[in-house]
Amino acid sequence: MRRKQTGFWLFILPALFAFVLVVLVPAVKGFYYSFTDWNGIGKNAVFVGISNYGKLLSDSRFWNSFLFTFVFALCSVICINAVGFGLAVLVTNKIKGANLARTVFFMPNLIGGILLGFTWQFIFVSIFEAIGKNTGMTWLQGWLSDQKTGFIGMLILLCWQQIGYMMIIYIAGIQNIPGELIEAAKIDGANSWQLLRYVTLPMLMPTITICTFLTLTNGFKLFDQNFALTGGNPAKMSQLLALNIYDTMYGTTGWQGVGQAKAVIFFVLVVAIGLIQLRATRSREVQQ
């Protein structure tokens, strides 16, 4: 018994040490610095109470970024899950080339966010612009030059990256549905729509919970794609919350403490929204 316990701690200690050093200690320090006038470099920081949080509340850019992020996360959750589920249903219907389709749809998830951002920036700014000029389609010109096209561009990028990943999770959920349930529904005369609505979707609720949680938190935490694709431009109107915090920390002199306060509020918001979503979707899960 002691040998098992010793082996357990020997395996877990390196990961636990890395977690404490890289995640827990910086988080505690960041929370402390949010109540100080820390300059981002030195260790000397004077306690200023909640004044940083007061500055945060009066920062219109923060609230603009929050609203922009909320709408973006909501749209990304709907688009990614709807398309990912649709593709999962399609490739599990024993069509030709289903295995190849799974690989192709999943591949964008393997590409880093920064690389994806610059790749799609080239597509939107150069390729779309050239096509628009040569064909007279003015709506293809000037992409990423305003908040609307920046929003749509980031949504396209994130959907292209994550739909394949969610598709794989939905495929696993669909394949886990007991075959006798589907056969019984067919014997009772259920058509394809009734089969989807009354059998597939209820049995997929645990999978929907996972996918919704992942897409929701990813939408709120998005940074590298936003940084590479739009950089928050024009005039910081396409800044998501993570990029706004970064810009406050490294782009505004003397506001490092405010940046830490924003990070604390951001953490609380993401945790709260994630827990609410988990509670809402888990209440609809069907016990198998």
Image (cartoon, rainbow, N blue to C red):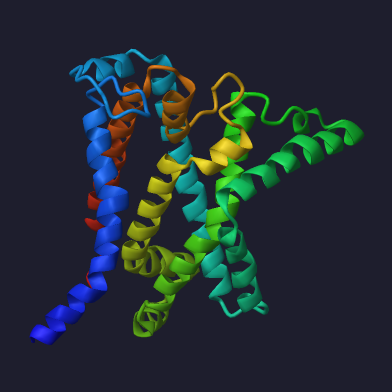
Using residue 232 as the reference point, say whether residue 205 is left or right of it: left
Whether 72 is drawn above or below 3: the answer is above
Q: Hey, which residue is sitting farthest right in the picture?
A: 134
- Check the picture and name the quadrant holding the N terminus: bottom left
- In the orientation shown, which residue stands out farthest toward the left? 1
Query: Residue 6's quadrant in the figure?
Result: bottom left
258 w.r.t. 153: above or below:
above
Quadrant housing residue 219: top left
Asked if residue 284 shows in the view, the reply is no
Q: Give percent across and percent down for residue 168.
A: 49, 68
User: Does 38 appear above or below 172?
Assistant: above
Q: In this view, does 200 lie above or below 77?
A: below
Q: Which x, y percent locates residue 111?
A: 60, 57
From the viewer's perspective, tell me whether residue 274 is left or right of residue 164. Answer: left
Quarter of the figure with residue 228: top right
- Tell which of 245 and 83 is nearer to you: 245
The quarter of the image holding the C terminus is bottom left
User: Residue 40: x, y in percent?
Assistant: 37, 28
Residue 259 in view? yes
Q: Is residue 285 left or right of residue 116?
A: left
Residue drawn where x is 19% and y is 20% of the image: 47
| Residue sitting nearer the eye, 115 or 184 | 115
Q: Which residue is drawn at 47% across and 54% down?
A: 81
Image location of residue 152, percent across then percent down: 60, 36
Instruction: Give left or right: position of 227 versus 207.
Output: right
Residue sitting nearer the eye, 184 or 212: 212
Front residue of this view, candidates 267 and 82:
267
